[in-house]
Image: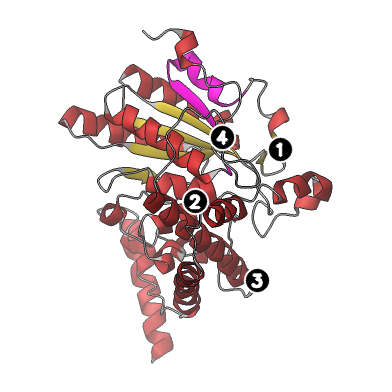
């Protein structure tokens, strides 16, 4: 059994870059290499463009709802890049950019948010579970997949994403406890963006940090500046490696901020002021990363233009795909309710089919 002191996270969130994009002195984690940093920057740019485009599609009535991760793109990028091809990602409703960074078609990702009855993509194709709207339910699923992989002798790691609000749910605690007891190779990645819709963190938890919650379950935990892309990558790399090596589940808390409203249906001005949001503008993960790459002369004008073009191509595909009206099939209402339809469902399906037939004639 691990000593409680060994499980404690660092007193301050791990940082590799300050707000200006300058390296932080004394960091004890290896800095990600040039290629990974450029890949991370491209993912940040695409993620930001995805957020902006999806928000515009909501205003145009093309999407039913969109929970923006604007300002949290470093977390999205880190989650996608830290995993190997055979690993699993378990996202929340706010993790669209991470799902796309994992290789899922953006139009398929937005199918659920458009209001369709299914997730839009095949979870097995890229090992990405459907985006979960109920808080914390995906954490239990991630533990199940990780535990099964361990029983089979596979080296699969599951990364379970959640927000600070999810840590108040029973599923969060059950998932940590089960994972710790059975040493499931799962990384719990909490994006602490300071709000569970309108409830501030101070009204959710009295713990020194959300990472401290891991101690009670025997789960190793760490804190990281969630707007510092190299630090997020380095911390998640270490957590994934530890889980894969058989060291049991890992808990990482990223300190970030929800720059925009909870969703398009939310009025954030009712519970927080503009003065509270302003300081986080200077901590923008995209600007911080860009400043570092320019300082190191790794981001040429040509490379930046190429990345911007890729982001625009993603946005164009989103616009065209989401704006394409699909012909609904009413019979799908009954197709996946039960494996064997009940007499009532068969009766209702026949009634609907008859109505449609008579209208058509």
Mark 1 and mark 3 residues within 8 Å of each other at the beta carbon: no
Of circles 2 and 4, the one toward us is 4
Q: Which mark is residue 83?
A: none
- Classify mark 3: helix, strand or loop: helix
Residue 91 shows in this picture? no
Q: Which residues are magenta?
A: 209-227
Residue under numbered circle 3: 59
Residue under numbered circle 4: 15
Mark closest to the chain's N terminus, 1 or 3? 3
Mark closest to the chain's N terminus, 2 or 4? 4
Q: Which mark is residue 199?
A: 1
Mark closest to the chain's N terminus, 2 or 3? 3
The picture places residue 17, in percent across and down from the top left corner, at 57, 41
Mark closest to the chain's N terminus, 2 or 1? 2
- Classify mark 1: helix, strand or loop: strand
Mark 4: give few (<14), some (14-19) or many (20+) Cα within 10 Å: many
Q: Which mark is residue 95?
A: 2
Mark 1: give few (<14), some (14-19) or many (20+) Cα within 10 Å: few
Mark closest to the chain's N terminus, 4 or 1? 4
The picture places residue 175, in percent across and down from the top left corner, at 42, 27
């Amino acid at each position: 059994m691990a000593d409680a002191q060994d499980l404690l996270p660092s007193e301050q969130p791990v940082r590799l870059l300050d707000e200006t994009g300058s390296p932080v002195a004394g960091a004890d984690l290896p800095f990600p290499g040039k290629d990974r940093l450029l890949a991370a920057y491209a993912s940040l740019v695409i993620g930001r463009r995805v957020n902006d485009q999806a928000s515009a599609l909501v205003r145009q009535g093309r999407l039913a709802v969109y929970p923006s991760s604007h300002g949290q793109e470093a977390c999205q990028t880190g989650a996608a890049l830290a995993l190997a091809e055979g690993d699993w990602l378990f996202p929340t409703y706010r993790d669209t950019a991470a799902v796309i960074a994992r290789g899922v078609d953006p139009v398929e990702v937005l199918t659920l948010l458009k209001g369709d009855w299914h997730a839009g993509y095949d979870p097995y194709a890229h090992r990405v579970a459907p985006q979960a709207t109920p808080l914390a339910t995906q954490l239990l699923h991630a533990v199940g997949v990780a535990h099964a992989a361990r029983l089979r002798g596979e080296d699969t790691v599951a990364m379970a994403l959640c927000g600070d609000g999810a840590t108040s749910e029973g599923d969060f605690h059950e998932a940590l406890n089960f994972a710790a007891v059975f040493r499931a190779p799962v990384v719990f990645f909490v994006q602490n963006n300071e709000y569970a819709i309108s409830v501030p963190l101070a009204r959710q938890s009295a713990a020194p940090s959300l990472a401290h919650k891991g101690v009670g379950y025997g789960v190793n935990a760490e804190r990281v500046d969630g707007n510092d892309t190299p630090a997020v990558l380095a911390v998640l790399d270490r957590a994934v490696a530890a889980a894969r090596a058989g060291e049991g589940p890992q808990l990482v808390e990223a300190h970030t901020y929800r720059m925009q409203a909870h969703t398009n249906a939310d009025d954030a001005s009712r519970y927080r002021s503009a003065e509270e949001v302003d300081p986080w503008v200077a901590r923008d993960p995209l600007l911080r990363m860009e400043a570092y790459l320019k300082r190191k002369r790794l981001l040429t004008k040509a490379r930046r233009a190429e990345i911007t073009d890729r982001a625009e191509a993603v946005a164009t595909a989103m616009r065209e795909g989401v704006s394409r009206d699909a012909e609904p099939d009413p019979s799908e209402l009954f197709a996946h309710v039960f494996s064997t339809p009940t007499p009532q469902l068969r009766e209702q399906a026949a009634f609907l089919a008859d109505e449609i037939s008579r209208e058509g004639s």
